[in-house]
Amino acid sequence: MNPYTDTKLVPCPFCQKGKADIRPQYMWTGQRNNLISATVQHWCERAEGQLQSFLQIKGKTIEEAVDRWNTRYALASVGGGPLPAAPAGEEKVDES
């Protein structure tokens, strides 16, 4: 059971699909486990002929890692986000 299922993660800024996972890292101190970092991980869906993309963002706390992941999405959205796919057989040409 993942106790972080209620944590709101926005979609991947590149593929807009899939599910991201929160992975906390703990260290045993001899008396208890201490959280030392947290990672948000995501595997983009692989398109035919492309390499598999893997994203991960780390933070010192779970909240920091989630905030960084969600901020990355917001920055990609403001910056124009991913380029639309070119129709089959055509190449993208920068007309600027």
Image (spheres, rainbow, N blue to C red):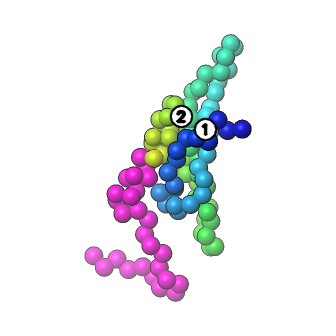
Classified by dominant secondary structure, the portion drawn in magenta counts as: loop
Magenta-colored stretch includes residue 12: no
Query: Residue type at mark 1?
Result: Tyr
Q: Position of residue 1 (x, y in %)?
A: 72, 38
Q: CA distance from mark 2 to mark 1?
A: 9 Å
Q: Residue placed at 62% from the left, 42% from the top?
A: 5
Residue 57 spot, x, y in % from top left: 51, 44
Q: Position of residue 39 (x, y in %)?
A: 57, 40
**Residue at image point 44% right, 73% down:** 84
Q: Is residue 15 left or right of residue 25?
A: left
Question: In the rendered image of this protein, does residue 27 appear above or below residue 1?
Answer: above
Residue 34: quarter of image: top right
Quadrant location of the C terminus in the rendered image: bottom left
**Of tags 2 and 1, which is closer to the observer?**
1
Residue at the front extreme?
6
Tell me whether the residue at label 2 lies in contact with that at label 1, contact meaning CB atoms closer than 8 angstroms.
yes
Where does label 2 land, which residue?
62
Q: Is residue 57 visible?
A: no
Query: Which contiguous range is marked in magenta?
Result: 71-96
**Secondary structure of residue under mark 2:** helix
Q: Which residue, as the protein is rendered here, is positioned at the far right?
A: 1
Q: Is residue 74 magenta?
A: yes
Task: Return the residue at label 1.
Answer: 4
Tell me if mark 1 has few (under 14), some (14-19) or many (20+) residues whose alpha carbon lies within 10 angstroms of its own.
Answer: few
